[in-house]
Amino acid sequence: MPHADLVFTGGPVFTANTVRSRTSAVAVSGGRIVAVGGDEVRDLVGPSTEVVDLTGRMLLPGFQDAHVHPVWGGLDMLRCDLSAYESAADYLDAVGRYALEHADDEWILGGGWGMSAFPGGTPTASLLDTVTGDRPAFLPNRDGHGAWVNSAALRRAGIDRDTPDPADGRIERYADGSPSGTLHEGAMALVNRLLPAEPAERMVEALLTGQRYLHSFGVTAWQDAIVGSYGDAGDPGPAYLAAAADGRLTGRVVGALWWDRTAGLEQIPFLVERREQYRAGRFAATSIKIMQDGVAENFTGSMLEPYFDGHGHPTDNSGISFVPPAVLNEAVPLLDAAGFQVHFHAIGDRAVRECLDAVEHAIARNGRSDHRHHIAHIQVVHPEDLSRFRELDVAANMQSLWATYEPQMVELTLPFFGPERSAWQYPFGDLLRAGAVLAAGSDWSVSTPDPMAAIHTAVNRKAAPGYEEGEYDPFYPEQAIDLATSLTAYTAGSAWVNHLDDLTGTVEVGKYADLVVLDRDPFAGPADQIGATRVLQTFVEGERVYAAS
């Protein structure tokens, strides 16, 4: 064998391969791994070989984010980005400064505010008016399921006390029925349909900005969880095609085409056509995203039993199933038969059950497939449904960073779930014990795309260093999973979901050299320091796409 192009040696290698999870050296040629081990790697070092001395630091497969929005995250970074702030005063200051610096923009756009900064999680238009004046402003919150708008935006959209709530959303109101300034779920569309379209080159800039950010955290592949027209940012699909065509797309990307919940089964031929159009280089839109419910904090997460009122009394609200189960049970078998993977969003236990039921209908009609359907978020899973993930071959797509006590959980979720349901949240340990395939993602820009911060939380059920929002006990620690399992979910597990497991996800001979160098061996230190781990270098096919300064 000729000399290798690149060799890693001098530190532990986590392979994410259950047969042999650790080794000590890796050789790369032509973008692929050609040797794994000791002597066989050293023999491949020649005069032109680049040798990376790990000096005790860990090498592992590139992280793969199974649920993320990098184009929209990059666009947020280019707009009025509120994600770094925590208080209402800081949000207002940042919006005010952005408004002054972008005085020629017709709209003030951005977002990333946290619900816990405002009473009930619902900021008001009058508050936003103090820093925006008469220019309309539209600012989604971190989870993208609600938006803060000012009075000018409400006027432009014609939203007043007589405007009815849409079927899939809610207008937050004062006692007299007039809109207060927060729009939930489908109500956001009343305003965002008026927003100016972003130029194509701006969307490509947003993609490349988001890609650089993901690479800085060691992410080499991902599933973009919404490819289509949704929200205030436009369809990221054309940006992926443009970047893939000229080689600027360095990440491997599966696109999840958006299922329009205002339409029905008649959209399937369009999605089949779009799948063929949205395929180039490292990008392929082979999945379908179905958002089955909202989120718990605004009571649109779909629950089997009603929410409580905060004092332990049941209400008449059990959330919203955005796609009626009868439609879902027809759509999923048809999508499955058409060769699509289905990527579900499900927060509440009713939504999780409805998604599992739909996959069960697909199996009954079509037989078992290898499409690798998966349910993202899985915040509340009824204990009776845990074993169904394995039985139906549905992967559990974890956003494990959220499995912790923090103000939003303590103030806006736990009182309205009650003790029993609260204990069913983020049941990663139970899902693992039930035999489910675990994949992992971040949902950035909802939360940080840092895999090590999420892995820290999965192991400790507490926030990682630098992400704490107060002093709290571990969050249902019986649902913790070990470090090796969590690392494997964020590498091999997500690669399996993305149908990339034959090419990536583990350190094995023949696979692409999509690799990450960490600044330490996280197994060697205390568990409460896992989240302090940083990425030093990121490689895609042996090419360095990120190096820490």
Image (tube, rainbow, N blue to C red):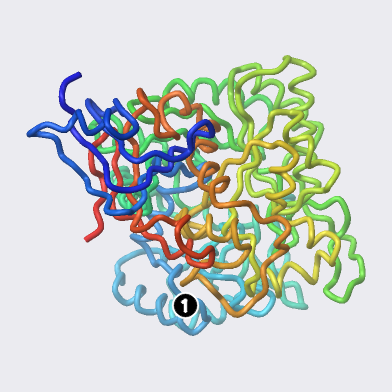
Where 325 sits versus 454, above or below? above
Give the quadrant of the C terminus.
bottom left
Secondary structure beneath label 1: helix
Foreground residue among 183 and 521: 521
Which image quadrant for residue 125?
A: bottom right
Which image quadrant for residue 311?
A: bottom right
Foreground residue among 512 and 166: 512
Residue where numbered disc 1 is placed: 91
Where 173 sits versus 547, above or below? below
Q: Is residue 200 left or right of residue 346?
A: left
Where 404 sits versus 241, above or below? below
Give the quadrant of the N terminus.
top left
x%, y% of residue 492? 50, 36
Where 441 sits versus 147, above or below? above
Amino acid carrying mark 1 in the image:
Tyr
Foreground residue among 493 and 341: 493
Crowding at label 1, few (<14), some or many (≥20) Cα neighbours within 10 Å? many
Q: Which residue is drawn at 74% across and 50% down?
A: 167
x%, y% of residue 93? 42, 82
Q: Residue at x 27, y 54 (%)?
A: 55
x%, y% of residue 243? 29, 36
Confirm whether residue 65 shows in the render.
yes
